[in-house]
């Protein structure tokens, strides 16, 4: 059931209770969690936080805690499956689900008692009507009471024939209704996509209660930017949501800049700006950033000798000396940095990179701390998917959560260093896949598989890193191929998951087109292909388009996928 008044139907209910927070492992979920934690701190709400990376962990966490808790808040997990069927809770258990995954399962939508969905109502949800999906189970075989009531045999026969006709009609109507129901559900559940960021939904709640702080607003911005960096939402949706947040930013960061009212340097300021679409460039060298950002790397085709030449020409066109470009951005000449954005944009247009400018926000505090929202997203993601083992599984989650607080700059800088490594690894893998022609057309989709022993292959056993790699690879492939048909195809990418258990992780991503609506049909397709071939798969990720598969079942699974999508 959709919650129309978050304050009354959600917050006021849990403020006096003990709550269990189940939070998925993505940056948007972490930001929503931070906002909710800050609200809980204001009102002294008792809560326990449990990170969940997939359905199995969600079930385990629920089973462990169901006796102590009656109120569960799920962030970025749980909306797109039938929760009650999976968890089998007691009747007095309440679930509040704040999840950007779409489509929302119809049982969750129409369950009035136990499931409350915290979702922005203006998202186009297109939920099917109740009567099209559910009907009262009529007892089909109604006992016709053929008690001999002394009527004539001919009368009995006539009544019996009428009942047979009526029953046949009912059965036919039921079959038609079921066929229509299957069709409606197929259309509704066919594509997976994302709605409004959960962090923005939580910030809205804080704003309605007049408890919104600048920190919360920053987390909402990072949550939205995460959706944009991971390519989960359309450009139109991103720009619309940026507009909504911009009004809040003006409200919170408006100061009269005269002497008496000027802010202390340590105060936090958020500013809207048109920035360059270059990953981490303010914490790296401009050269490294140009080489490791997917947009510039794909546009200039940097994996080829010709591409490297074009990069030199691009830098020469801007009039930037190599010595300046290759040193840390902070150390560049002030005179160059002042007009850098305009210089880069002007040259980028000549080289066919018209979208190098992007609307975003940055945060300032202290003398040297300035971060853009995408810097935080890259850093937090890298901390969460860090492959260097440092204790229990939840360590990475806690570190990533901590790095979002202003007081933990050391963790944030550690995240930025890891992010640079990750981006380098992605770019090198993309280059080697394209140069060795690892991307092959399978008919209805492109396919690329990383072999065991490839450098950094361990990093790509993690879902977010693999998705980023797949998106960067598809972008680069579309720029490099001359085959017009291949430019319009989606991509399926596989990487080794666990060598000892013999499993691979596989992800499917939609085609890379200008008008792409970011809707992904691979979730359903993977399920059908696994079913039809009895492949040993594990659908453990909250994103339906990511699955784990036994290595020896891979070829029959792919054959089924090809015939399914042809």
Image: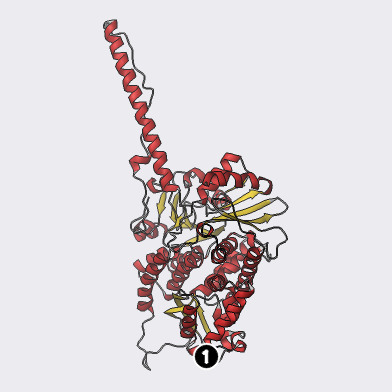
Is the residue 551 above or below the residue 439 in the image?
Answer: above
Q: 364 or 64, which is in the foreground?
A: 364
Q: Position of residue 503 (x, y in %)?
A: 67, 51
Report whether residue 26 is seen.
yes
Q: How crowded is mark 1: few (under 14 residues within 10 Å), some or many (20 or more)?
A: some
Q: 333 or 17, which is in the foreground?
A: 333
Report whether residue 284 is seen.
no
Q: Position of residue 428 (x, y in %)?
A: 65, 69
| Local SS, label 1 | helix
Specify the color scheme.
Answer: secondary structure
Is the residue 552 above or below the residue 165 in the image?
Answer: below
Q: 471 or 135, which is in the foreground?
A: 471
Determine which quarter of the picture holds residue 39.
bottom left
Is the residue 400 above or below the residue 121 in the image?
Answer: below
Determine which quarter of the picture holds residue 529.
top right
Q: 563 or 45, which is in the foreground?
A: 563
Left or right? Give the position of 359 relative to 307.
Answer: left
**Which residue lies under the disc numbered 1?**
336
Q: Position of residue 417 (x, y in %)?
A: 62, 75
Is the residue 265 above or below the residue 526 in the image?
Answer: below
Q: Where is residue 141 in the image (x, y as percent from the top left)?
A: 39, 22
């Amino acid at each position: 059931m959709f919650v129309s008044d978050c304050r009354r139907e959600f917050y006021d209910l849990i403020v006096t209770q003990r709550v269990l927070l189940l939070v998925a492992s993505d940056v948007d979920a972490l930001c929503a969690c931070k906002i909710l934690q800050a609200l809980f701190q204001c009102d002294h709400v008792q809560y326990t936080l449990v990170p969940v990376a997939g359905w199995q962990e969600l079930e385990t966490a629920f089973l462990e805690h169901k006796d102590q808790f009656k109120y569960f808040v799920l962030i970025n997990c749980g909306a797109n499956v039938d929760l009650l069927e999976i968890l089998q809770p007691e009747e007095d258990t309440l679930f509040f689900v704040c999840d950007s995954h779409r489509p929302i399962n119809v049982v969750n939508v129409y369950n009035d008692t136990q499931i409350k969905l915290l979702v922005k109502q203006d998202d186009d949800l297109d939920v099917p009507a109740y009567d099209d999906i559910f009907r009262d189970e009529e007892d089909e075989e109604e006992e016709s009471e053929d008690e001999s009531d002394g009527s004539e045999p001919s009368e009995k026969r006539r009544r019996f024939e009428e009942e047979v006709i009526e029953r046949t009609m009912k059965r036919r109507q039921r079959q038609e209704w079921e066929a229509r129901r299957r069709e409606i559900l197929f259309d509704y559940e066919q594509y997976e996509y994302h709605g409004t960021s959960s962090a923005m939904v939580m910030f809205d709640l804080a704003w309605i209660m007049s408890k919104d702080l600048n920190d919360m607003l920053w987390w909402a911005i990072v949550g939205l930017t995460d959706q944009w960096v991971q390519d989960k939402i359309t450009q139109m949706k991103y720009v619309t949501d940026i507009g909504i947040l911009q009004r809040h930013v003006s409200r919170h960061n408006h100061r009269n800049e005269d002497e008496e009212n000027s802010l202390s340097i340590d105060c936090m300021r958020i500013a809207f700006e048109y920035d360059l679409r270059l990953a981490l460039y303010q914490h790296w060298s401009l050269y490294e950033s140009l080489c490791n950002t997917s947009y510039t790397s794909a546009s200039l085709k940097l994996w080829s000798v010709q591409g490297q030449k074009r990069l030199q020409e691009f830098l020469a066109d801007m009039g930037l000396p190599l010595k300046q470009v290759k040193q840390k951005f902070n150390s560049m000449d002030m005179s160059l940095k002042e007009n850098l954005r305009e210089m880069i944009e002007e040259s980028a247009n000549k080289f066919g990179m018209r979208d190098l400018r992007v609307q975003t926000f940055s945060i300032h505090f202290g003398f040297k701390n300035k971060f853009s929202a995408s810097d935080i997203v890259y850093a937090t993601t890298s901390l969460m998917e860090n492959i260097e083992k440092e204790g229990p599984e939840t360590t990475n989650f806690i570190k990533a959560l901590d790095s979002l607080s202003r007081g933990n700059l050391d963790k944030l800088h550690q995240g930025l260093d890891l992010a640079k490594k990750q981006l380098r690894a992605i770019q090198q893998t993309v280059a080697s896949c394209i140069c060795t022609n690892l991307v092959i057309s399978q008919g209805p989709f492109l396919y690329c598989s990383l072999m065991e022993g490839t450098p950094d292959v361990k990093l790509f056993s993690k879902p977010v890193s693999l998705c980023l790699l797949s998106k960067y690879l598809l972008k680069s492939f579309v720029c490099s191929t001359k085959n017009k048909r291949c430019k319009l195809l989606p991509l399926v990418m596989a990487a080794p998951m666990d060598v000892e258990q013999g499993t691979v992780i596989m992800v499917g991503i939609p085609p890379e087109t200008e008008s792409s609506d970011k809707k992904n049909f691979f979730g359903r397709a993977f399920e059908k292909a696994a079913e039809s071939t009895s492949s040993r798969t594990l659908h453990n990720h909250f994103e339906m388009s990511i699955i784990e598969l036994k290595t020896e079942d891979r070829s029959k699974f792919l054959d089924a996928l090809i015939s399914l999508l042809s």
